[in-house]
Amino acid sequence: MPKQKRIKTDYPGVYYIKGTSTATGKHERIYYIYYWKEGKKIEEKAGRQIEDAMTPARANALRADRISGKSLSNADRRAVRRQQENEVVWTVSRLWEEYKANKPLTKSVATDENRFKKHILPVVGHKQLKELAPLDLDRLRINLGKTLKPQTVKHVLGLIKRLSNFGVSRRLCEGIGFKITVPKVSNLKTEDLSAEQMKKLLEAIKKNTHPHAGDMMRLALSTGMRRGELFKLAWEDIDFQRNFIRLREPKGGDDQTIPMNEFARQLLFNRPRFKDSPYVFPGRQGKELIDINHALAEIKKDAGLPKDFRALHGLRHVFASMLASSGQVDMYTLQKLLTHKSPVMTQRYAHLRDETLIRASALAGQLVNEIVQPKETEMEKSG
């Protein structure tokens, strides 16, 4: 096709060519502009006389906007449009899939997925985090609170917060721009077992044939280790020379070490090592264990323990209660053994230590009283 003739206008940098309107079939002018920007000549279509109501004056104004940067060139606008078309929209639902893909398959992830699908996906799954308003999460919190326990509601809202932190840290999207209000939860339940219950539990463990459950319960009782720490425990974490156990990321924090007492040492020393697995309590195919609830429930049932007693975490409480009630362990030492980040959580056991001190003080008072007021002699009694 031969090059069409360019016809100048009264405005510098504005010209037109003759064409035919695709809408009416009539002859019309098609206006173009050209200008220099950053050393580069840019030439582009401004618009059609009939279809776009373009005039030389309007074309000249458009050219001025392009030169000043008030509007993008046609090429730049097409580039932006392509970028927007290809840009990933990080909805809450899509962000969850990415978050899950970056986590190892554990029981906690499975629990989170259940919470997400049941409580979050139907309500805000289609939205982006930046679109969420405080009212959205207030409504979610209130509606969930009608049927769920405060702790469960707190976990659901906590998952949304984690997704927001994940999206921001990975530079995938904007996060939530306000503080999420969560229900207040009393998490000071302290579980304990009597001497008789302890005896029955140890007997039930001895009879149980599961390869891991009994030893995990004994280790929790003798060290205070958390469920997740037991699941992650690898042979390389056990130092038989210095008698220490390394805890991997306790409650999401930095790795820590706790002393390995003789009971725990003998238990671990006698544990069989499973082929092709680095874990002390391996799961299927030698991978990290993710669930052992059924076996623990059997032992708990055989021992006649209360239904609400948590098989592993409850024994962590028993460990702490035994030490606190002995009166021989101060709260700071107990805090370090439990790897609590602050003394607040450890204070739940303070009353046990206080009771021991009160009994000791009462005994001291009784001994002094016996010295001050000696018992009547046999002669005084007979007289």
Image: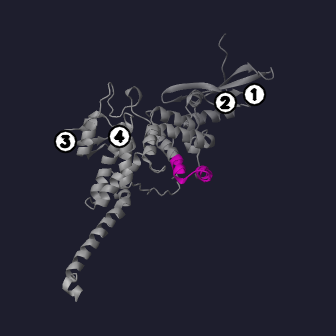
Kind of element beneath mark 1: loop
Q: Amino acid at mark 3?
A: Arg
Q: Quadrant of the N terminus?
A: top right
Kind of element beneath mark 2: loop
Taking the image as shown, residue 241 lies to the left or right of residue 199, namely left
- 145 magenta-colored: yes
Please name which of the two marks, 4 or 1, marks the residue nearer to the observer.
4
The image position of residue 370, as x and y in percent, is 22, 78
Residue 126 vertical placement versus 342 (above, below): above
Viewer can see residue 148: yes
Q: Amino acid at mark 4?
A: Lys
Taking the image as shown, residue 306 lies to the left or right of residue 82, namely left
Taking the image as shown, residue 178 lies to the left or right of residue 330, namely right
- Does the residue at mark 4 contact the one at mark 3 (Cβ under 8 Å)? no
Q: Amino acid at mark 2?
A: Asp
User: Mark 1 to mark 2: distance in Å?
Assistant: 22 Å
Residue picked out by circle 2: 10
Q: Single out the residue that lies furthest toward the front.
A: 382
Please name which of the two marks, 3 or 2, marks the residue nearer to the observer.
3
The boundaries of the magenta stretch are 135-157
- 134 magenta-colored: no
Q: Nearer the viewer, residue 58 or 137?
A: 137
User: Residue shown at 30%/65% (left/top)?
Assistant: 356
Residue picked out by circle 3: 242
Residue picked out by circle 1: 51
Please report whichever mark, 4 or 1, sits nearer to the chain's N-terminal start: 1
Residue picked out by circle 4: 206
